[in-house]
Amino acid sequence: MRIAWKIFGISLIVFAVMAAAAAFSIYKIFEINTELQLISKVYSPLRNEIAQIEVVTLQEEIDLERAEKYQAELRADRLEVLSYDKSAEEIDALLQNHPELQTRIKHLEERLAEDFTRFEEHANKVEDLLKSAEARVKAAQDQSASLQDKLELAALYPALVAIETQHNNFHTHASTLVNTADLPPATREKLEQQLEQEEDKLTAHLDELHKHVNQFTDQAITTAALHEQQALYASIAATASGGALALLLSSLVISGILRPMKLLTLSAKRAEQGDFSVELEPRSQDEIGTLTRSFNTMVDGLRSTQKIKDTFGQYLDPRVVSGLIADHEDATAGEKKIVTAYFSDLADFTSISEQFTPSGLVRVLNRYLDLMSSEITDRQGVIDKYIGDAIMAFWAQPFCDDGGQATLALESALRNIEHMQAFQEELPELTGLQKNLPQIRQRIGIATGDAVIGSIGSEKTKNYTIMGDTVNLGARLESANKIYGTQLLVCQRTRDTASGIEFRAVDRIQVKGKTEPTSVFTALARSKDMTPALKELQTTSEEALHAFAAGLWSDAHKLFATILAKDPDDRIARVFLNRLQIIETQGVPDRWDGVWHLTSK
């Protein structure tokens, strides 16, 4: 499963939990709304109507009592002056003689009529309120979706009908009592007792209805509060469970991502440090698993590349191999640069090698080349090729810093010359010969200048090398060591750009293949190792060479003789004394310019 799907799955699960909680909350809010609607549209108006019924009923009773009072006063006034044994016509005739009594009776009759009218109005209002309450309960019962609410409303409706019936009974008895003035006292008393009973029953029914409405209202309020609490708890539970679930699932997904990513990071660092043995096991089918498989493929490719570099690095400088593998333009493209070319060879090694067995010869060469090459490569030099016992190397950008080529090459040459003594001591072990061992001497030529560097060759076979006059000059200087008996010869540009090394002027020559002459030098010592004797040799050599070039033969002879007297093995002084002898016997060469022309390689 892809990481995006995992994250989407977590979101979907949390959303489902929150949606379920929201749905439950919405349902509970709907239930709360239902209860509130029941309270606001049924119970609350019903309580108000019951209260009004109670008030109007009370007013109705007051009207009835007032009417009974007026009726009792009216009877008392009529009986006050009149006899009970008179007929109604006689009473009316006698009233004509009592105008003040007639006026009072008339006033009482009017008040009685007004109170009875109000009694009827209040009775009608009670009937209207009861009809309205019944209609309200009936409509709510029809619209209610809850069985509990239907049962509650069903219990209210008969109570309202009973109150209406009881009120009708009360109204009937009250009307009979008020409208019948000449009832015998016993009958009136009986009617009044029945009326009181009807009043008590009506009051009891009203109290019972009021009690039920209050109970149902309180129950609705309690139910609404319960639903609100459940909705609140559901929201809290959903939020807590959704958050906990999100944290749990997210931590699992993040752990599933970070753990392999940490392994990938550590493995990448190991691979960066050259450890290509690392291999990870894909543990998922998501992007991390794909990345892990790609990493293994990459490491396998790097392992193969490293194997190529390790293998071909034995035949070609590893830095060149890296450039060729990476298709690095600076390392492969032909380009003109300042180069220091290095050539070395063993003197008379062809004849010397005839003394060794083939296996001994291979051991000698391998050991020699290993010693010499290490000093070159350790100082940023590039081994161009081996030709038998000969070494061709060079220093140039991008393999070393510009300006340090000559110094690096000379340091390598001096170290190699120092190694020759140790190498000579190893010959018995390498060759198996314990006596008559040949003395092996090394010749090195170093030249600095412009050269073309890059991949040269055909489409099928190429060689990364350097070409130009500087290269040829280095090769000629290596060969020129034969003439002067030296181990190291360098051109003037090498001498001028090198640092930390002191030189002895050897000659001014023109090698075969070049038209311009060059001054050549040999290294005396590192600057810190210079002694007064070496300093004197350096100065005397320059003076002698200057006298020789200027044609001051006597001065030159004297100076070279001085050098030879101090060091009878000085081959350079012997060469020039021999030349002076030839000049003395055969004369000065034509167009003498102080340059010695070499006619052989």
Image: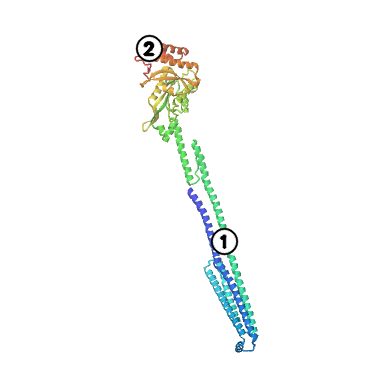
Residues at marks 2 and 1, CA–CA distance in whole angstroms: 130 Å
Please give the residue where the numbered disc 2 appears in the rendered image: 583
Residue 327 higher or lower than 151, as above or below: above
Evaluate if marks 2 and 1 touch, with contact meaning CB atoms under 8 Å apart: no
Visible in this render: residue 32? yes
Where residue 438 appears, as percent x and y from the top left, is 46, 18
Residue 131 higher or lower than 366, as above or below: below
Callout 1: SS: helix
Task: Give the label on residue 227, or none.
Answer: 1
Q: Residue furthest top?
A: 585
Residue 232 higher or lower than 574, as above or below: below
Question: Mark 2 or mark 1: which comes first in sequence?
Answer: 1
Tell me which corner region of the image, top left, top right, bottom left or bottom right, holds residue 221.
bottom right
Callout 2: SS: helix
Q: Nearer the viewer, residue 269 or 59?
A: 59
Which quarter of the rendered picture does the C terminus lie within?
top left
Where residue 455 appears, as percent x and y from the top left, is 39, 31
The amino acid on which the numbered mark 1 sits, given as a three-letter code, is His
Task: Please name the residue shown 39% across and 32% down the image.
Answer: 333
Task: Please name the residue shown 58% across and 63% down the image.
Answer: 223
Where residue 506 appears, as percent x and y from the top left, is 42, 17
Q: For mark 2, does the 10 Å Cα neighbourhood hold few (<14), some (14 to 19), or many (20 or more) residues?
A: few
